[in-house]
Amino acid sequence: MSSSVLKVKGGWAGSISYVAPPSKSYSHRSLLISAVSKGVSRITGLSKCDDVEATLRALRLMGVPVSTRGGEVLVEGCELQSPGGEVYCGGSASTLRMLAPVLAAKPSYAVYTGDESLRRRPVRMLEEAFATLGVEASSANGKPPLKVRSGGFKTNTVMLDASESSQHVSGFLVAGARLGEGFRVALKNRVLVSKPYVELTLRMLRMHGVETRVEGESITVEPGEPKPFNHTVPGDYSLSAIPLAMAAVSGGSVKVHGLVDEPQPDREIVEILRRMGLKIEWSGNTLIAENTGVLKACVIDCSENPDLVPALALAATAAEGETILRNVGRLESKESARATLITKALSKMGVEAFFNGDEILIKGPCRLRGATVDAGGDHRIEMMLIMAGAAAEGETTILNAGSVSKSNPGFYSWVLETGVELQWV
């Protein structure tokens, strides 16, 4: 986008029909696990978002043959080549934190860097984990660029801190599969945040014939060679959460097509919105949400689903009472100071919203008012603010917009098709 200021005309009302974009988390993992499997894997419906493109670029840089045929991406597993220099990850922390362990499993050298937002993201947990494996790693005071010089892992057990992110846990699990000789991930203090994302990695490793074992404070990758697998990427629940939340705010009905009713990261959005009183039903692979009465505030633990917080905050503005979103402190080290930006923006739109360091408190119900708000260059906050602005009275001006292609490149087009008036200024 040439401009980073977006005006949204309020007063929109109606019904929403939305096709869930391909899962970003599934797309990253399908590429990485296929790259270390012996043979050709086919991936149908791979996400075309900026973050997944960053993983594709990095794998090609490491010599992985990747080609496109019709709607399929073909990945031929091979021995990854050492880049010997810079690996540019754009704004994708998933690319950096998952790929660095996979490459470092064998002798290699790489410097992982990215855009301004990525260079604010923590990587110290990777440095500390590499140290337990005898791998040299250094960063700029715990932030990228991250330099990793490896002679291969010196032991088959990594000890790591998963209290802030689980992306590197998935990275080391795939690294263990690449080695094929058995590998153990030991969790410091038995803490694992965003657990559904690690469960997705374990499920996808099994698709490729790699068995794993979860025991208390550790996860073991059993010996064995990963085999190719043909993936169909399911719809993304976290990227469908904002349209679903609009059913709460707008009072209309929302249909989300292309979701699979099976365990996926952030599928919890369905159960949480039901708890708040939203009527949600399945019709095949379409989820239909409708506000049929008064929504109820509730207390929500967000430790396993941090990406749902913007949508839950939006839905909470329509619920009666005080909604408490717990364990959100680590959102401050996402693409932006996410918890702070959410509460500041909603406060400007007339909501009683507070952030106390680890909880977001929102008092509702509240009629949203147009205001000038800051998306902070954060794709998830921007999507929330566009929909909040559409439902609000008056006009909303969003500063530092233009970042949604990081996860959801078709979002602006869909918003316009839905009848919301947008203008870049």
Image (cartoon, grey):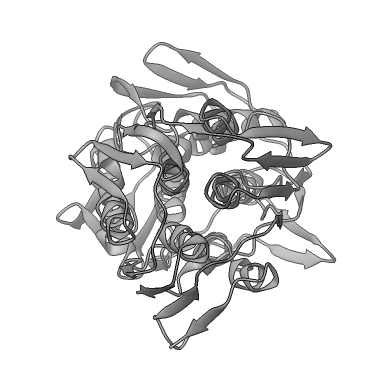
Query: Would residue 288 be visible to someone looking at this image?
Result: yes
Relative to 54, does residue 288 appear above or below in the rendering? above
Whether residue 219 sits left or right of residue 328 in the image: it is right
Q: Which quadrant of the view contains residue 36?
A: top right
Q: What residue appears at the point 46 percent right and 57 percent down from the top-left corner?
A: 384
Q: What residue appears at the point 62 percent right and 22 percent down from the top-left corner?
A: 211
Query: Would residue 105 be visible to someone looking at this image?
Result: no
Number of numbered discs visible in the structure rendering: 0
Q: What residue appears at the point 35 percent right and 70 percent down from the top-left corner?
A: 115
| Residue 195 percent across, percent down from the top left | 46, 28
Relative to 315, does residue 280 appear above or below in the rendering? above
| Residue 330 percent across, percent down from the top left | 28, 41
Q: Which quadrant of the view contains residue 140?
A: bottom left
| Residue 11 percent across, percent down from the top left | 54, 67
Q: Which quadrant of the view contains residue 393?
A: bottom left
From this viewpoint, which residue is outermost toward the top? 216
| Residue 61 percent across, percent down from the top left | 53, 67
